[in-house]
Image (cartoon, grey):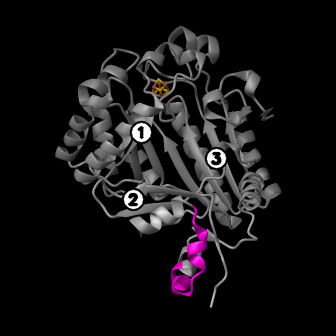
Amino acid sequence: MNIMVREISKFNVIVPEGQEDYHELVYNTFTGSITRVNHPLAEVLKNRSSSVFKFPEFRLLSECLENQGILIQPDFDELKEYEKMHQRWKEGRENVEVNALLTYDCNFECPYCYQGRGEDGYKIHGYKYMSPELLGLTTDFIKRTLVERGARKIELVLYGGEPFLPVAKQMGRKLADDISRWTEENDVSFSLHVLSNGSLMSDDDIEWLSGYKARLQIPIDGSPEMHDKYRFYKENRKGSFENVARVLSLTKGSGIETHIRISLTDETYPTMENLLGELRLRGLNHVYPDFCYITAFTEACSDFESHTLSDLQLFKIMPELWRKAHANGFPLDIRPRVQPLPCSSVADGSYLIDPFGEVYKCWELVGLKEHSVGRIK
Ligand code: SF4
């Protein structure tokens, strides 16, 4: 008795589990499933020998693989379905993400700042803050957008410049408290995400973020010495590591999902072991270490290009760092996810509003008025 012939998905990515291991992992980028298979089965999938699965003794296996999306029905047009999924994610009205850039001002002067610092900063944005009027209009815009889209969920992201500079902080709190109250009354789910350099937060700020179970991201650029070389105060060029570590310690047990954004450059990555050891010694391994590449994408940071790493270097370095972080007891968030959009900003419901009221789609293009897609007024 023959059974129905299934085909092999185009979306299987097969990787060896370990050097000497008999097993391989199949990640299906369409369904997001990850399946451990033995070597002969991995070979069948790689060679696309789907005829094997027509034999009755493989019926259960075939069904199981179909449940994971590794095998598909012959009439299932994966590319068409993927296109539909892409459209749904792009045009879906359920989710809204608003990034509020409260100020271009910052108490740091990092050399790779894509918004431009020093003279460049003055020319590009003049270190402007949102005005109270614009804050009010932004609040109205968010509520109106949620109603018009019939949205069920909003993620509000506060960032800058530095969103915890005193004036920006008051605005950020007002905006978040206002929107959160409104969402509660209108049965919309609210989440708060804050990007900060981590130098100015007080106990009270941490308590406020904790009330929202916010996600907080603070950059750290390697060992204390290396971090201080990159991330220093504008006023006196003093490094910020100690202050940032103090704020990280405040987040422990607070319910805030704390991530450290670690920029990998030719100078920082050799110091990562030192950083992980230092954080562990201080009992700070509750934070998620997010190892990130940086680009010299905008003109404002183009002179940093010689320090960036190539894709090939990153492919080698990242897994080594994840292993080290895991061995040091840090939580990791590295499971691959289905992502039919090249960037979440592509979604129609994603907006970024700067202190001039300009609306952008992409973080890396803020401040470049030719890339503005609208204006709040
Ligand atoms: S902390 Fe952020 S905004 Fe401030 S200078 Fe550094 S990269 Fe730019």
Which residue carries the number 2 mark?
Answer: 255
The disc label shown at residue 344, or none:
3
Tell me the chief SS of the magenta region. helix
At a point 64% along the width and 52% down the height, the residue shown is: 178
In the rendered view, tell whether residue 188 sits above or below residue 243.
below
In the rendered view, tell whether residue 347 sits above or below residue 122.
below
Secondary-structure class at tag 1: helix
Q: Are marks 2 and 1 in contact (CB under 8 Å)?
A: no
Residue 200 can be seen, yes or no: no
Name the mark nearer the viewer: 2 or 1: 1
Q: CA distance from mark 3 to mark 1?
A: 22 Å
The disc label shown at residue 315, or none:
1
Locate residue 78: give its quadrant.
Answer: bottom right
Q: Residue 365's spot in the image, x, y percent?
A: 65, 27
Q: CA distance from mark 2 to mark 1?
A: 32 Å
At a point 63% along the width and 18% down the height, the residue shown is: 125
* Residue labelled 2 has its Cβ within 8 Å of some atom of ligand 1: no
Q: Residues within 10 Å of mark 2 (few under 14, many from 20)?
A: some
- 49 part of magenta stretch: yes
Which residue in the rendered view is the most extreme toward the left? 281
Which residue in the rendered view is the most extreme toward the top? 119
Q: Residues within 10 Å of mark 1 (few under 14, many from 20)?
A: few
The kind of residue on which mark 2 rests is Gly
